[in-house]
Amino acid sequence: MKIEEFIVSSANHVPGYEIVETKGFVYGLTVRSRGLGGQLGAGIRSMFGGEIKEYVKMMEESRNEALNRMIRHAEELGANAIISVRFDSDEISNVMQEILAYGTAVIATEK
C-alpha cells in the first residue's frame, strides 16, 4: 500500500523494492472516545443487534490517525517506507479505545 507515496506494508519485504537501510521501530498511537450522542445511539442500537456504525466510524478514524502518526514518526527518522506493520487495540475503559500502529522504518529503493 502506498499512502501519499510512502510505502506501508504488513510484509517483511516489498516486491520490486530493496531494503537498503533500517531506521528503527516506529509507532503511532491514539485514544478515542465516542461523544455522549454517539454512545447513546450505539447503546440503543446494541439492544437490537447488528453493526454499531458509530463505533465502526470511530475505529476507522482511530486506525487512520494511528497510521498517519506512525508515518510521521518514520519520516522524522528519514525513512521512506515502513515494513512489518501491525495494529493493536485495547480498551482503556468502557468508553475509550486505544489504537496502536507499529512497524519497522526503512529506506527502500526500487530494484
Image (spheres, grey):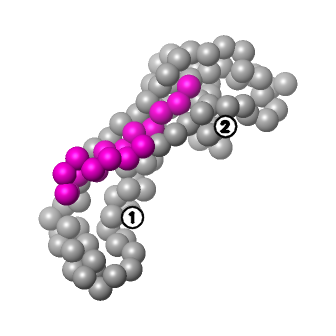
Is 101 a magenta residue? yes
User: Which residue is located at x 33 percent, y 64 percent?
Assistant: 55
| Res. 26 in view | yes
The residue where tag 1 is placed is 56
In the picture shown, does residue 3 fall above or below 49?
Answer: above
Sequence-first tag of 1 and 2: 2
> Which label belongs to residue 47?
none
Left or right: residue 48 compared with residue 2: left
- At label 1, the amino acid type is Val
Residue 46 located left or right of residue 70: left
Q: Residue furthest right?
A: 111
Residue sitting nearer the eye, 75 or 101 = 101
Outermost residue, left direction? Answer: 36
Q: For the magenta stretch, what is the residue range?
A: 88-104
Circle 2 SS class = loop
- Quarter of the image for residue 105 reads top right
Instruction: Find disc 2 in the rendering and name its residue.
Output: 11
Which quadrant is home to the N terminus?
top right
